[in-house]
Image (cartoon, helix red, strand yellow):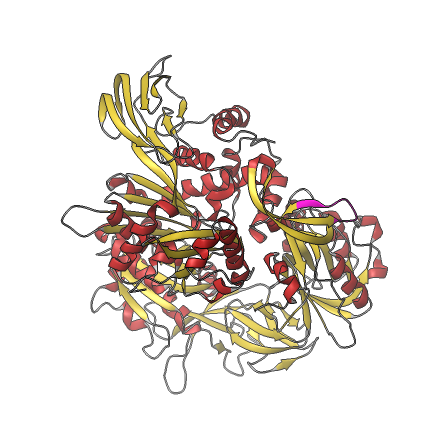
């Protein structure tokens, strides 16, 4: 990829669907020729041929100029490929709940499904059986540094149980963290040096917000072409290209990820990422609380048992039942998954707020683009103004597999307008007092100014088409929080398929506990961006 | 590039589900305390013993001294010294779980009084034996994969209790079905499942089992297994999922041909295994499709052509195909809702 290639393909192999795109060199830059997706298992050549055929129908001369006029030619193109795999299970074991909690929280953001176990008060047989379970492929054992009074007399037991498990399963990767990893510690001596599985020493989950431990655990997963790692690399480059802070929220069938990339003049771009299997569309195990969470976002009535069965079907055939109520159920499940993702990554909220939020992953495509924009406003409740876009062609992660950052950035610079569909801008205000009127919004668009009365608790939608910018004036009666505290504010917002969303529903979003009024409220919001969603 | 002939290559865009698979690997849990009776490489046939299961697992502490004075690894077997075996206060034999911290030579031992032997339900080769974890077997023969299963792997004579569309009511099961694996059509409820188990049926194969019925059955199964007498293995296999639909015609045709044959119902992975000798697999036309999701769930037909993106209910745009469904006028169905079989 060091010199411009006439055409190449990107392949993102998800656990539910495979997305492909064709990218060609035309007019002195790379262009996205087309993209599509199909159920996992459908051959990639068939999907590539579908894209090629459609591109030919749309602009035959462009396609011919990149050498793709021949049937089947797309299948032979060079490719950028990445894949998402089903997360494997990591047993996290500590002496007490107090110690387990931070360890498990870090592990849960490193792409592992976490099985948390504590020694204190445990039935040793159940504990050993759980550790030896065949689904567990690695163990993270940890202690405070130095061990606390509540765990000191349990640490010997902890070491013994973990060491015995590695004798039963010599291939298990074992990570000792925090107090257990102290140099010259006795615990490490319990492990047989000749066993095939490595024993690794790791930092405490409290060091540097858990980032060093998270990086180590993420590396343990292997999976060279991991799409979520690639997405993080691409986000970093995108932040550099756009000279903005970019947050990518990805929800997939097997997990979700949250990545924040930033750029500052004169310094290198940075990225922080978390891969969270619990943020899967339908996490495993799928508990009653997970079902409640989906029901809590549904704008239509649903029988609980039937919905559970429907979600079970969605887990086995995630590409099926995607129209009608199936789409509404999916978008409710996406919201529930996004909430789990944001709750698992509280440290991100302490970082500077993003200027652009990009949603990625096939699940966000369940409904219209504007409905996806509202879904983000529903779950990401950080006051401020931010543009929202969608990685509709799922090319971001494959581009992240390019190792050279400069080359990656050049490609993203070429493709940025093609690959990110603008959904619009969300302006989210908090600190609004209850009352009839909160203030006024004036949008200075191409067709002259438009005034909109703002009421607390409402969502106002203003049509600002994709590709357009609008000057917006916000005048509130009281000081509010829109990222900064002010009464009067002027903003330049970018348009999108969802336009401008001014969200005055407060932070956090409070919904009625009773299902019926809750559904009515959700339906009233959703109906504004998704006409006919309940057909 | 495709198994489809050139003019039919477009059919590759419709998800394909194999009718049968070969070389399936099955797993049998082997929790600490259970004793494997096979070794890797062993070829087992139905009825061969695989493991000894301790039904009342408990932990005792024992002194473990080897003649050489070295430390045995966790997971190794231990038995009391000869001559002391019959003392009531002495521990029985078992598996070493973990050393007792701070007490040299002292170990926790998983043991129990009530033991049951588990036999193979299929002809297979043992791939892996990992004490305290799992036994893995590579199954001989062909398998029809299911969506999920519950209960225990079992073996029996395949019988068709209903047609592919039918339901089996509890009253329709009697002791005459004892020892069989019953194909019950579209659906079965928890009451019929528990009656089938009580009547000595070894397994149930249905197109779908609702989640509530499955959970009720699993709760009943746990109670059965906690009882003093070990019940005969009984399993339930849902071929397609949780929502009601008929058994796919090619699968139903294959099950008809297998009627009267010995088959095995596996739980992990969910599958029905059979000896393919003398069984002709049904021939499935390449354009045959079945609806996997959405409003026409379970309907079958012939796919005519791909029609590209179409707008469906709730304004969702999806890739679609025109399909003649069950003799009805051609309809446009989302591609994701269709499956081929072959």
Provide residue A346's location: percent of width, then percent of height.
Answer: 31, 42
Seen in the picture, residue A434 relative to A115 is either above or below; the reply is: above
Name the residue at the left extreme. Answer: A266
- The structure residue drawn at horizontal position 36% and vertical position 84%, both measured from the top left corner, is B69
Q: How many marks?
A: 0
Provide residue B91's location: percent of width, then percent of height.
Answer: 51, 72
On screen, residue A320 versus residue A471, left or right, reads: right
- The stretch in magenta equals B325-332
Seen in the picture, residue B52 relative to A250 is either above or below; the reply is: below
On screen, residue B126 versus residue A358, left or right, reads: right
On screen, residue B279 versus residue B295, left or right, reads: right
Q: Quadrant of residue B66?
A: bottom left
Seen in the picture, residue B33 relative to B68 is either above or below; the reply is: above
Provide residue B305's location: percent of width, then percent of height.
Answer: 66, 53
Seen in the picture, residue A359 relative to A429 is either above or below; the reply is: below
The C terminus of chain A lies in quadrant: top right
Give the camera-side residue of A196 and A340: A340
- The structure residue drawn at horizontal position 38% and vertical position 48%, both measured from the top left corner, is A419
Is residue A329 located in the magenta-colored stretch of the structure?
no
Give the camera-side residue of B233 and B110: B233
Q: Quadrant of residue B280?
A: bottom right
Name the residue at the right extreme. Answer: B176
Res A11 visible: no
Give the camera-side residue of A330 and B208: A330
């Amino acid at each position: 990829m060091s010199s411009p290639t006439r055409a190449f393909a990107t392949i993102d192999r998800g656990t539910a669907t495979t997305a492909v795109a064709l990218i060609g060199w035309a007019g002195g830059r790379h262009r996205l020729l087309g993209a599509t997706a199909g159920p996992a298992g459908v051959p990639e050549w068939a999907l590539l041929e579908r894209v090629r055929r459609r591109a030919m129908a749309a602009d035959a001369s462009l396609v011919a100029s990149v050498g793709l006029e021949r049937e089947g030619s797309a299948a032979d193109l060079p490719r950028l490929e990445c894949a998402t795999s089903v997360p494997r299970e990591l047993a996290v074991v500590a002496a007490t709940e107090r110690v387990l909690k931070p360890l498990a929280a870090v592990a849960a953001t490193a792409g592992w499904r976490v099985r948390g176990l504590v020694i204190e008060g445990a039935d040793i047989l159940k504990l050993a059986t759980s550790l030896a379970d065949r689904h567990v492929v690695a163990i993270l054992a940890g202690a405070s540094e130095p061990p606390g009074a509540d765990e000191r007399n349990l640490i010997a037991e902890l070491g013994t149980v973990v060491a015995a498990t590695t004798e039963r399963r010599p291939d298990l990767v074992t990570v000792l963290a925090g107090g257990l990893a102290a140099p010259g510690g006795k615990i490490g001596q319990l492990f047989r040096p000749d066993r095939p599985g490595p024993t690794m020493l790791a930092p405490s989950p409290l060091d540097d917000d858990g980032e060093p431990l998270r990086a180590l655990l993420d590396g343990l997963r292997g999976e060279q072409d991991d799409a979520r790692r690639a997405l993080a690399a691409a986000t970093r480059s995108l932040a550099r290209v756009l000279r903005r802070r970019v947050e990518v929220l990805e929800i997939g069938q097997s997990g979700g990820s949250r990545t924040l990339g930033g750029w500052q003049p004169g310094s290198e771009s940075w990225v922080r990422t978390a891969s969270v299997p619990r943020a899967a569309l339908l996490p495993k195990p799928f508990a009653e609380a997970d079902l409640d969470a989906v029901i809590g976002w549904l704008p239509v009535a649903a029988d609980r048992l039937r919905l559970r069965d429907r979600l079970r079907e969605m887990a086995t055939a995630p590409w099926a039942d995607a129209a009608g109520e199936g789409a509404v159920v999916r978008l409710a499940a996406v919201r529930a998954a996004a909430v789990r993702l944001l709750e698992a990554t509280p440290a991100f909220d302490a970082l500077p707020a993003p200027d652009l939020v990009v949603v990625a992953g096939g699940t966000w495509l369940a409904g219209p683009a504007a409905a996806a924009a509202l879904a983000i406003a529903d779950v990401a409740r950080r006051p401020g103004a931010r543009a929202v876009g969608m990685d509709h062609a799922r090319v971001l992660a494959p581009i992240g597999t390019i190792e050279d950052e400069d080359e990656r950035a050049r490609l993203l610079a070429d493709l940025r307008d093609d690959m990110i569909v603008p959904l619009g801008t969300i302006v989210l205000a908090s600190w609004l007092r209850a009352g009839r009127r909160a203030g006024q919004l004036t949008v200075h668009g191409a067709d002259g100014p438009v005034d909109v009365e703002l009421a607390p608790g409402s969502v106002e939608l203003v049509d600002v088409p994709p590709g357009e910018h609008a000057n917006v004036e916000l005048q509130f009666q009281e000081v509010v929080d829109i990222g900064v505290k002010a009464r009067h504010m002027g903003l330049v917002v970018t348009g999108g398929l969802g336009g401008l969303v001014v969200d005055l529903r407060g932070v956090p979003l409070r919904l009625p506990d009773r299902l019926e009024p809750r559904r009515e409220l959700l339906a009233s919001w959703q109906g504004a961006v998704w006409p006919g969603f309940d057909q | 590039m495709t198994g489809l002939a050139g003019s039919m290559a477009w059919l590759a865009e419709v998800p394909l589900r194999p009718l049968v698979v070969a070389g399936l690997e099955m797993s049998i849990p082997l929790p600490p305390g259970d004793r494997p009776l096979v070794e890797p490489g062993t070829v087992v046939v139905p009825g061969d013993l695989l493991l000894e299961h301790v039904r009342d697992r408990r932990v005792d502490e024992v002194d473990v001294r080897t003649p050489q004075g070295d430390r045995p690894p966790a997971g190794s077997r231990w038995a009391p010294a000869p001559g002391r075996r019959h003392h009531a206060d002495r521990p029985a034999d078992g598996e070493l779980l973990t050393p007792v911290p701070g007490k040299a030579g002292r170990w926790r031992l998983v043991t129990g009084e009530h033991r049951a032997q588990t036999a193979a339900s299929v002809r297979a080769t043992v791939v892996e034996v990992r004490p305290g974890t799992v036994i893995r077997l590579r199954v001989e023969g062909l398998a029809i994969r299911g969506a999920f299963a519950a209960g225990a792997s079992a073996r029996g004579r395949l019988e068709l209790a209903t047609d592919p569309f039918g339901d089996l009511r509890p009253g329709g099961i009697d002791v005459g079905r004892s020892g069989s694996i019953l194909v019950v059509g579209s659906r079965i409820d928890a009451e019929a499942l528990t009656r089938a188990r009580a009547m000595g049926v070894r397994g149930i194969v249905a197109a779908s089992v609702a989640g509530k019925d499955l959970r009720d059955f699993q709760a009943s199964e746990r109670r059965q297994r906690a009882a003093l007498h070990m019940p005969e293995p009984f399993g339930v296999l849902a071929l397609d999922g949780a929502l009601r639909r008929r058994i796919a015609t090619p699968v139903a045709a294959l099950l008809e041909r297998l009627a009267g044959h010995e088959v095995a119902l596996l739980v992990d992975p969910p599958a029905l295994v059979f000896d393919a000798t003398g069984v002709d697999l049904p021939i499935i036309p390449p354009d045959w499709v079945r609806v996997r999701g959405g409003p026409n769930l379970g309907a079958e037909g012939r796919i005519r052509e791909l029609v590209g993106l179409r707008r469906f209910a709730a304004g969702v745009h999806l890739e679609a195909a025109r399909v003649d469904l069950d003799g009805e006028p051609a309809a446009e169905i989302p591609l994701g809702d269709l499956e081929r079989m072959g």
